[in-house]
Amino acid sequence: MSGRQLGGRARSMGIVMPIASSFRAARDAVVSGVDQRFAERIRLSPMKNEKADPDRPQVVIMAVLRTGDETAGPLDVSGGRSLHSRIAAGKAALYIDRTEYPDIVLRKKDKLRALERPGEPVFEVSTVDDRNHTRLIAGLNQA
Amino acid sequence: MSLVRIALRICAVQAVKGRTLVGDNVLDSEIGALETSSAGELKTPKEKQFVSVYTDDGKQLSGLELRSLTASGEIDLVFEAGVASPHLITDPETEEQVIMAGLPAADANFEFYLDLTLRQVADALADPDNEWAAIFGRLVLGFDKCQRARISGDTNGVRLAAHQMKITVTAIAEPVAGQPLKPESPMAAFFAKCESDLVHLEPDMAKKIALMKAQIAGEDEELAAAMRRYGMTHSEADAMLLTLPDGGAP
């Protein structure tokens, strides 16, 4: 993907950004451009053994939170045993700009609260993808 | 077959209500999915840990006489208890979560909570001071089998664990239509208990009791009652000299 194409796509989103000279610069420009539009206020609450982690303080960041459709699924996620009860829930994901927040470390079971959404819903980190080259991505469960 | 199943289920729900860690959140045959609210606090009583009661498969594999369908046979009675991450109580500042006061929301504590809850279900059903359990006990001739199953997972958008206890019970026979219930029978005790304790709490209970009673109403002659009980045809009854020449029962 050339810097020229990226610049064109970003401009069509109404975001003004310089023509990037390297792949890394282009990537950072796109990530930051998207975040300007879609990021929302998120409060991260790192946890350790079900308690607030003293080594990683609570922090409010701007990041992109995407929630999927809530679907009614059986409790029995693994199949096999037939439970009758069902529960409605949906997966969500948090995308954090690594250039903006290089120091954030996420771990499984950390909590986060979407401060700008009605009811300020809480989520729990279930998976952390820290190998992605653009963002730190956390798979979330409802909490 | 059916009236006894209804009675078993209602008695089981009432016997367990308020006697386990889930409090009054004992659900009768819940079909729809349990909802989880966006806010950390608990918005409706259903959005918390639960026990659901179902009457499931039933079977009577032999011993049905002629065409009689009054035997209840073996009925699977299912108790399900579950905890999911949105059911927890969240501290609005620290986001620390607890299942209940003093019990952090660790996976191990999910399991502890469910094991203890189902133990409490078993205790509630065996409690001699529990009037609903006493009627439940009279509707059941014996427990044949008890199976436990558990599931857990975090791939559907919530972290959850659930336990199931399936008790296979041999239940009393259905009351036959056209024969007044004896006042000392378990079903009569069930109706009386519903009318005294439940009707004012659940308005639809009055209608349900009325419909159940209508299903077994009437006063047959003794021999006609026998025909009804065994699904006997008129020609069979004639051959057994159970009918009068005019076709009616004596």
Image: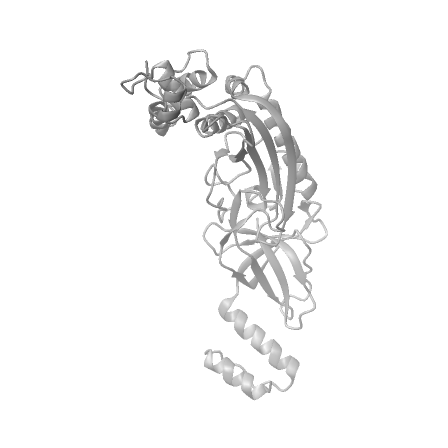
Instruction: Count all numbered tags in the image, as a single digit.
Output: 0
Q: Is residue A136 left or right of residue B78?
A: right
Picture coordinates of residue B223, whole percent (x, y)? 37, 16
A24 versus B138 height, above or below: below
Picture coordinates of residue A109, whole percent (x, y)? 66, 51
In this view, the residue in front, A78 or A3, is: A78
For image coordinates 46% across by 44% down, the residue present is: B32
Q: Is residue B12 left or right of residue B182?
A: right
Picture coordinates of residue A73, whole percent (x, y)? 53, 51
In this view, the residue in front, B250 or B59, is: B250
For image coordinates 31% across by 16% down, the residue present is: B244
For image coordinates 51% across by 80% down, the residue present is: A10
B84 versus B236 height, above or below: below
Q: Is residue B96 left or right of residue B13?
A: right
> Is residue B19 something one can see in this rendering?
no
Colour convention: one colour
A42 versus B27 height, above or below: below
> Is residue A114 something one can see in this rendering?
yes
Q: Is residue B182 left or right of residue A5?
A: left
In this view, the residue in front, A41 or B88, is: B88
Report the quarter where the C terminus of chain B lies: top left
Picture coordinates of residue B108, whole percent (x, y)? 70, 41
